[in-house]
Image (cartoon, coloured by chain):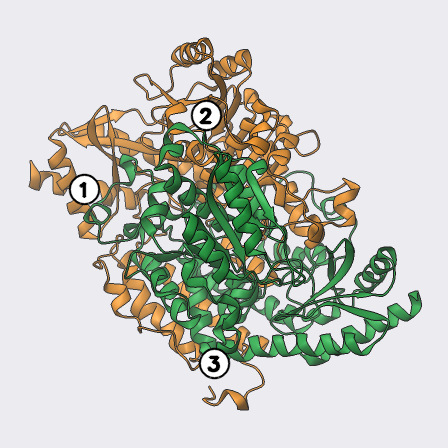
Chain colours: A green, B orange
Amino acid sequence: MASNPQAKSSFHMSPEEFREQGHAVVDWIANYYRRIESFPVMSRVLPGEIRESLPKEAPVQPEPFERILGDIEKIILPGITHWQSPNFFAYFPSNASGPAILGDLLASGFGVQGMLWATSPACTELETHVLDWLVTALALPGKFRSAGNGGGVIQDTASSSALCAVLAARERATNFEANRAGARQKMTAYTSSQSHSSIEKAIKIAGLGSDNLRLIEVDESFAMRPAMLADAVKLDKAAGRIPFFVCGTVGTTSSNGMDPLEEIGRVCREFNLWFHVDSAMSGTAAICPEFRHFQEGIEYADSYCFNPHKWMFTNFDCDCFYVADRKALIEALSVLPEYLRNKATESGAVIDYRDWHVPLGRRFRALKLWFVLRYYGIEGLQFHVREHVRLAQEFAKWVLGDKRFELVVPPPLNLVCFRLNASDEVNQQLMDALNRSGDLFLTHTKLRGRLVLRMSIGQTNTAQHHLEKAWERIQEEASRLV
Amino acid sequence: MASNPQAKSSFHMSPEEFREQGHAVVDWIANYYRRIESFPVMSRVLPGEIRESLPKEAPVQPEPFERILGDIEKIILPGITHWQSPNFFAYFPSNASGPAILGDLLASGFGVQGMLWATSPACTELETHVLDWLVTALALPGKFRSAGNGGGVIQDTASSSALCAVLAARERATNFEANRAGARQKMTAYTSSQSHSSIEKAIKIAGLGSDNLRLIEVDESFAMRPAMLADAVKLDKAAGRIPFFVCGTVGTTSSNGMDPLEEIGRVCREFNLWFHVDSAMSGTAAICPEFRHFQEGIEYADSYCFNPHKWMFTNFDCDCFYVADRKALIEALSVLPEYLRNKATESGAVIDYRDWHVPLGRRFRALKLWFVLRYYGIEGLQFHVREHVRLAQEFAKWVLGDKRFELVVPPPLNLVCFRLNASDEVNQQLMDALNRSGDLFLTHTKLRGRLVLRMSIGQTNTAQHHLEKAWERIQEEASRLV
């Protein structure tokens, strides 16, 4: 590269160089996936180590692309915890796939900003369409389809969907008074003690106060007790508070607990509460008819979300959020300054997704989801979801077959919660030793006050032999400890 | 592809196929950029047209990748409004570049989720580091650096940054009472009448009520009048309300108005108000020393944001958000469930970005920004920013040279607001005719009650001849109308 910028008329990458370097990056990624099992799953760097390898200030002169790409191998790779390794069993997965990555690459290439229909009609229409496809594919209620009063939108995460659901519910309950005058009324929300932390976060953000979020007790399967929900709602009403929102979960983060949507839904209907269903992880399972019983009662939901970026082979970020009444959502979030006015919007014939979430700008995220649905087909998705569930059920049997271990709860789908019959400390040591080894990565939670290990099986390339090897390693480390 | 899924043991794309198809997608994009000027800039499809070309339901059987990619050309391309065309002068740009697209591709390939330091240390550390680089590169106050009490984080958009700023301010002002008990106090916020709509949206979301947002009047350059701000604050205090937040703008959306940060900052300090500065578009200009005067007084800011995805050649989404006191932000947004606990977090030696924004999960967005900073170098970025500003100043001269037109306000940087000396209706017709022609795309706003056309010059590949051609076309259409 020239060292004298005056002599240059452009510092941009030409299409020709893009072609060449693009091939190099694609090759790098293909090669990364080929050797991914050779890396310790959890990064071993110490705090600050990556930063120490980086120059203190940004370069003044341009650097050749080859050198930048070279630093991916040298500097970045050691600091990666390999979410795409088939030996990744931690948290919930964030499983990617070739067609998703390439669909997303096209989105970057187009570089459109889909805040309005007019700013790229394909960006909006493909999104609406693919989210309608998923209503059928997952047997969701027809009211979530865009043809009626409902519709779907892609959000970044289930946290953002939860926030939007809370806001729409808040505005519906206050007749848009909260948006105008502030959230002054004593409103109360409900979710189970096992719900995701994002519900509490949403309640706080919305100015409603975590004191006004009731964490309803769960049963032995970690599912919300609907009778306790009804009692809590009645108590609040009697005290002059305004119950307005319930979040049910299909597949809680700790243990994959399944809230009874039908019974919760009936309580919501009786007391006119907005019913949001968070199915971030397990929603994908509904692609298989045999797993749809977990969402029985979903017809009661006012809003629903699940994350293709968790278990549907669509790289992060991609959360699908549905509402039965899009007007409630749009009116809660709409602002229309002059500089965004346009004929298509004013005709009312189009969707402008800017009013469906917090950000104004938006990326063309529907492309990657479209690519995944077409490349796999419904059959391909069913095949892999079934396989993950089968593997988890296998793993649970292995746990039951080794008397040193306890299966803490029967796994409904693809998350196995288990522990060594020993103290929390020993269980923690077991997990730390396994993770330190680099052979696999798993994480923990607390259930009934005890530390529990979680094997979350949903990484794209996890196959039976990975799980067998993982169980071997778990048994080995356990032998060393007890 | 096999039509009998039982016969297949995997529907995934192999690394080999990824390599082959990845090259095809890269070639498609390179080719797209080569012929981008041949498309009408604004898509001409009618509402519903894209959806009509799509099958009613998702395919059951897998489809070959070639067919999917073929539909990009056939179905998607006509519905694209070409944000990456050098003839795109609408809204604010969302300018991409080769190195950004390829950095983002690597982020998709790694597929890591950076919610915690531990979930991929490189994802967190590179982000912190690159945001520190930008503090120097843009001559931002040292208090935004991570080495002290501050720090930067990448958000999706300036709307989300505004929301986070409002939330941190709300919690600081109420001593975290709002998070706990709800936003019950009569709090008031301030911004200019020219501020971005996201400020009002943030105030509504936070449960504070748009009635409590004061839109302060602006002067003839569309900059906030600080004396009016001080008066409004005093009035609210006298009425027993709690002023808590001010948003100043460097480069408003309508006209690139520049709020006087120093004087606003002094008011904020006097009354202990959180001062957020939104420099979404114009922040990038500070890469050039000669444009830094617009951010004089930035030392008073408690938080600041600008969007590399607007003018720094980094594809959407990438907004850099800085706070002087990260504790205020983190405490406002933190939730720590058991399943996210880990040693690195508990050591206090690391940053966990999950507490810096609304979503929990996060993509490795620092990669694309790092690639841009290195590929261009500071000199390369300066060169192109200067060129865009020069072109805008040129354009303004052309407008001044044609008596049929009025330059509505002298352009501070790269946005030119002008109008034909005619009715709003005729100006609207002028814009519609130009946009319909496909030769360029520009949008409008209202200033002093009149419709004004905006030429926003910041697309990556916009060069002098594009602007000359655009001006020719504008003059041509004007001749037809008046």
Residue B272, quarter of the rendered image: top right
* Image position, residue B255 (x, y; %): 32, 29
Mark 1 and 3 residues: CB-CB less than 8 Å, in contact?
no
In 3D space, how far apart are the residues under numbered discs 3 and 2 (Cα atoms)?
51 Å
Which residue is painted at 66% across and 70% down in the image? Answer: A411
Q: Are marks 3 and 2 on the same chain?
A: no
* Image position, residue B431 (x, y; %): 18, 42
* Image position, residue A160 (x, y; %): 49, 48
* Chain letter of disc 3 in the image: A
Q: Secondary structure at mark 1?
A: helix
Residue B395 against residue B302 in the figure, above or below:
below
Q: Nearer the viewer, residue B284 or A21?
A: B284
Q: Which mark is residue B431?
A: 1
* Chain letter of disc 2 in the image: B
Point out the frontmost of discs 1 and 2. 2
Residue B7, quarter of the rendered image: bottom right
For disc 2, the marked residue is: B247
Point out the frontmost of discs 3 and 2. 3
> Left or right of B474: which side holds B230?
right
Q: Are marks 1 and 2 on the same chain?
A: yes
Neighbour tally class for label 2: few under 14, some 14-19, many 20 plus, Cα within 10 Å = many
For disc 3, the marked residue is: A379
* Image position, residue A177 (x, y; %): 36, 33
Which residue is painted at 63% across and 52% down in the image? Answer: A217
Marked residue nearer the N-terminal end (1 or 2) = 2
* Chain letter of disc 1 in the image: B
> Left or right of A471: which side holds A247?
left
Amino acid type assigned to the residue bearing label 1 in the image = Met
